Image (cartoon, rainbow, N blue to C red):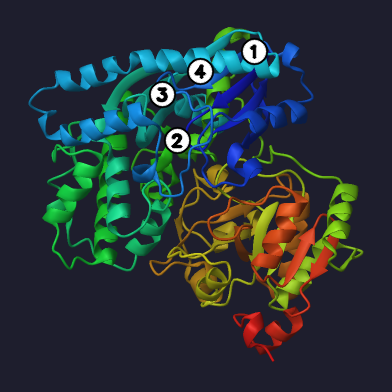
Amino acid sequence: MRVLGISDHLLSGAALVEDGRVVAAVNEERLVRRKMVMGFPRKSIEMVLKLGGVKPSELDHVSVASRWGHFLNDYVDFSDGVLGVDEGLVKNAFFAVGSQLSFLRSKLPFLETMYYGLRQPVYARRRRGIQGVLEKEFGIHCPVEFTWHHYGHAAAAYYASGFEDALAVTLDGSGDGHSSHIYDVTGGKFRHLHSIPSFDSLGNYYGYVTALCGFKMGKHEGKITGLAAYGEPSYREILDRFIAYRDGTMVNVGDAFRGAAVQKLRNALPKDFSKKDLSATIQDMSEDLCARYVAHWLKKTGKKNVALAGGVAANVKINQRIHELTGVDSVFVYPAMSDEGLAAGSALITNAEKCPELKMNGRKCIDNVYLGPEFSDREVEQALDDSGVAYERPASIEAEVARLISEKYVVARMNGRMEYGPRALGNRSILYRPDDPAVNDWLNERLKRTEFMPFAPATLAEDADANYKKMDGARDTARFMTITFDCTDAMAQQCPGVVHIDKTARPQIVNESDNPSYYRTLKEFKKLTGFSSFVNTSFNIHEEPIVCTPQDAIRAFQDGHLDCLAIGPFLVKNPEADKRVKAGAGSSAETVE
C-alpha cells in the first residue's frame, strides 16, 4: 500500500507512506527557499516520489490534509504572518467580516454555521482543483481522499508514538473549523470525544499576543515562549476576560476574533504594557489551560499515555506541564507537530483505513525524522568546486568537528538526509560549545536572528539523567527536541549556554542508533572537554528555512560568517575564523584586525 500525503496550505509539503511507514517527507519551504510557504506543493510531491523510488502509476491512494480550504495554485506570501496573508479577495472578505461580527457569535451562534456553510462551494473548488493538478501535471489517477485537519494531527502523533492505547490531543490555531480535538485511541481505533471551535482557540490568542509584542502571528510564537521567562504573569486578570477553561473545554469569553481580538486586547491592556510580562502571562495561562484541559480528558478516559500534535504542541513548556501531570505515564509529541506534519498524518489515516490488516497500533510509523533528501559525496564536492571555496577531507570528519567545537569554533554541519519538521537534529545544524553564557546573544546576532529562548543542547542519551530531571515517560519524544526538562545543578553550572533563565532546557537526546555520525561527534567532543552536550541550533540564516542542498549550506555558511562548514566528509574553514576565535568567539570578521 503506497499513499502520497499532501498538505497545501500553511507549511505545505508531501509525504510518502508505504505499508504504514513514512519513507519520505519534505516541506515546500525547504525546496523553494521561502519560509513557511503556502501553496500547492509541486516540488515536494516530486521529491518524495523520487526519494521513495515510486512512479505516479504505482500509487494506490492520494490523501490530502484538510477538507476545508481554498485552492492555492500559486505560493502565498507568509512573510508578514497570519494577519498579513493575502489569500485572495473571497477568503480575505470572509475573514474581515468574521472578525468584525465576532462579538455577535455568543448571541447568534448560527452565524458560525452560516459562515462555514457559505464557504462550501469554495471548498468544493479546491477539491476539484487539486484532483485536476494531480492528473494533468503528475499523471496521478488513483483515488484522492480528503481527511479532516485535526484527525491528521492526531493520527500522526499516535502512529509515531508506538503507544497501543493513548489519549490523542490536538491543539492549534485553526483547521477545518476547529482548534482542538480529543480522541480516545484503543488498539488503533480512534473515538472522537470532543472538539473546540476555531473561534475559541487558545492558539489564536497566543498569536494575538505575539502580534501585540511586535512579532508576526503564526511565525514568531517561539519568541514569546522564550521572552516569558523574563517577565511576570501580571496581566492574568485581563487575559482571563478573553480566553478561559470551562468544564473540559476552552471558551473565547472575549467574543473577539483575528484583527478585532488584537484591537480589543490592546485596548484592555495598559498603554505602556510590558512585553515581557504580557509574554509571561499568555505562557502561564496557556500552560494552565492546557494542563487542566488534558487532565480532564485523562480522567474521563482513564488513559495513561498522551500523544500530542498541532501548533500549540510546538510550545515545549506546555509539553513539560502535560508530561508532569499526575497520572501521565508517557507523553509523545509528534516531531513535525505543526501543519508541516499534516501530509504524513493524512497519508497515515488513509493507509490505516484502506489497509486495516496492517494493524498499525503499537508500531511506530517512523524511527527518526531523517526523511528528506541527501546528497552523495560527489554531489557535495561538485558544489564546493563550483563555489570556489577551499576545502579538505579530514581522516575523520566527526573527530575534526569535535576538535573544532572544543576549540571554540562555530561549526555548521550538513550530512545525510534532511530532517522533517521544525527542528534541526544534527544533519542541518550549527554546533558550538555549551559553556559560553553569551552564545545566544552573539551567535544570533551573527545569524541576524532575534531569539529569547537559549539554544538547545544535544546530549548523549547515556548521560541524560545526570543533566535533566523527571525524564521517565518522555525520553522518546526528547529525541526530537520537543519538550523541556528542569536541569540538574551540574547542568546549569557547566552548560549555561543552553540552560534558560528558569533553569530548563529543551534537549535533543542523542542515541547512536538514531544518527551514528552525530553521536560519534558528540562522543569525541566529550572525550576532549568532559561535556556530554553541545549547542545545536538550526542551520539557517534570518528569515530563511533550514538549508536543504549543498548550495544552500555553502551560501548560508558564507552569509552567516560562520567559522567552519562540515559538509558530508568535507571541511571548509572561513579564512577569518582563526583570527575571530583568537579574539573571542563573539567577534565579527569586520572587527578583527
Mark 4 or mark 1: name the one nearer the start of the chain: 1
Checking the image for residue 118, the label placed there is none
| 39 relative to 480, above or below | above
Local SS, label 3 = loop
Question: Looking at the picture, does residue 243 appear above or below residue 216?
Answer: above
List the residue tagged with mark 1: 135
x, y percent for residue 381: 88, 55
Where the N terminus falls, by quadrant? top right
Residue 414, by quadrant, is bottom right
Which mark is first along the chain, 1 or 3?
3
Structural crowding at the residue carrying mark 4, measured as other residues with C-alpha within 10 Å and reported as few (<14), some (14–19) or many (≥20):
many
Point out which mark residue 69 bears: 3
Q: Nearer the viewer, residue 536 or 571?
A: 571
**Pointer 2: residues within 10 angstroms few (<14), some, or many (20+)?**
many
Residue type at the position of mark 2: Ala
Identity of the amino acid at label 4? Answer: Gly
Answer with mark 3 or mark 4, whichever residue precedes in sequence.
Answer: 3
Q: Which residue is mark 4?
A: 188
Residue at mark 4 to residue at mark 1: CA–CA distance? 33 Å
Answer with the quarter of the image where residue 161 lies: top right
The residue labelled by disc 2 is: 309
Instruction: Using a 10 Å C-alpha cutoff, classify the residue at mark 1 as few (fewer than 14 neighbours), some (14 to 19) or many (20 or more).
Output: few
- The residues bearing labels 2 and 3 have C-alpha atoms spaced at a distance of 20 Å
Q: Nearer the viewer, residue 299 or 174?
A: 174
Q: In the image, which is nearer the foreground, mark 1 or mark 2?
A: 1
Q: Give the mark nearest the N terminus, 2 or 3.
A: 3
Q: Secondary structure at mark 1?
A: helix
